[in-house]
Image (tube, rainbow, N blue to C red):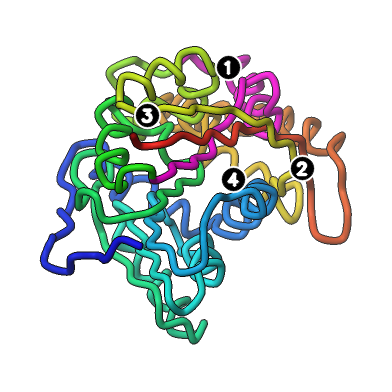
Amino acid sequence: MTKIDPTIPFVVPVSPIVEFWNDVLAPKVLTYRHILEGGLSHHSAQVFPRLEIQNGARVLDVGCGFGDTTLELARKVGPMGHVTGVDCCPDFVDIAQTELRSSGLRNVEFHVADAETNLPEQQYDSVFARFGTMFFVNPVSGLRTMRKALRPGGRLTHIVWRQRAENPWLAAARSVLLEHLPQPDANAPSCGPGPFSMADPTLVRNQMEAAGFTDISFEKIDAQVLVGRTIDDAIAFQLALGPAGEVFRTAGDLAERKRSAIETDLRAVFSSAHHDADGIWMNSASWMISATAP
């Protein structure tokens, strides 16, 4: 297995997109961690048993967030392996470090880094990313950076959302918001291309081929995800994050004036969703995309 060269530094990000994540989105993500981490894990839980990762492997987890996938990967590679988690948000990495200390694992490290623009080259047997690559400003460049991080023959697996129509957990609320508010201005500050930017497999295959990957495959993953513990929680989440949150944020004062009517319509959406003791659940759909670095 490839050994990691500890002298190769990770680069702390400074791009406008990363600044937007840290200044605007990170505090909201922290507030709704219970929805995001709890819901997204239903996709990675289906993917993990299918990962082609060997005991003793060196693995990079891109967009590691709070570190739950990184720690799971560390258990998968065993004590002779090693996993590095990177994320552009220091607040997320701080939480990941706390989770690491309580896990007892010794084969993990976390770094604040911009995986789209700079990673150590030919250091890893596998690269994994859960719902992070869709936000690359330049997908081909970001995928190429990830490919270069792999040793020859190494494998990339990333999870991205499928089409908006297959993801009512995000799309339904956005449709409600657009009945009351205008589309966001194209020049408004944002998190990047957005959650559905890699939904088209033909487009993504072309991007990955341009980035130098081979043996590219797509596999559908379907899961119900948590959208809130209560209806009020679900409404607040949608107005803070995701496509609906972007519509609400960019509308400014107009959104606040129409908040009452918007919340009434959102309440109807979540009232008809599946409820159980843990909260409210809606359908979601993703691609598990795998490829080889030649």
Alpha carbons under labels 2 and 4: distance apart: 17 Å
Residue 237 badge: 4
Relative to 245, does residue 13 appear above or below in the rendering?
Answer: below
Q: Which residue position is annotated with label 2?
A: 224
- When the figure is inspected, residue 229 is found, relative to residue 196, above or below; the finding is below
Residue 128: percent from left, percent from top: 45, 49
Cα–Cα gap, marks 2 and 1: 24 Å
Nearer to us: label 4 or label 3: 3
Q: Is residue 193 left or right of residue 165?
A: left
Left or right, 174 with respect to 231, comes to: left
Q: CA distance from mark 4 to mark 3?
A: 36 Å
Magenta-drawn stretch contains 213: no
In this figure, which residue is indicated by the disc labeled 1?
178
In percent of width and height, residue 78 lies at 51, 74
Which numbered mark, 1 or 3, is in the foreground of this view?
3
Q: Earlier in the sequence, mark 1 or mark 4?
A: 1
Q: Amino acid at mark 3?
A: Phe
Q: State the extent of the magenta-drawn residues as a range.
A: 154-183
Tag shown at residue 213: 3
Q: Is residue 239 left or right of residue 65?
A: right
Q: Residue at x 59, y 36 (%)?
A: 288
Mark earlier in primary sequence (2, 1): 1
**Residue 55 or 97: which is nearer the viewer?**
55
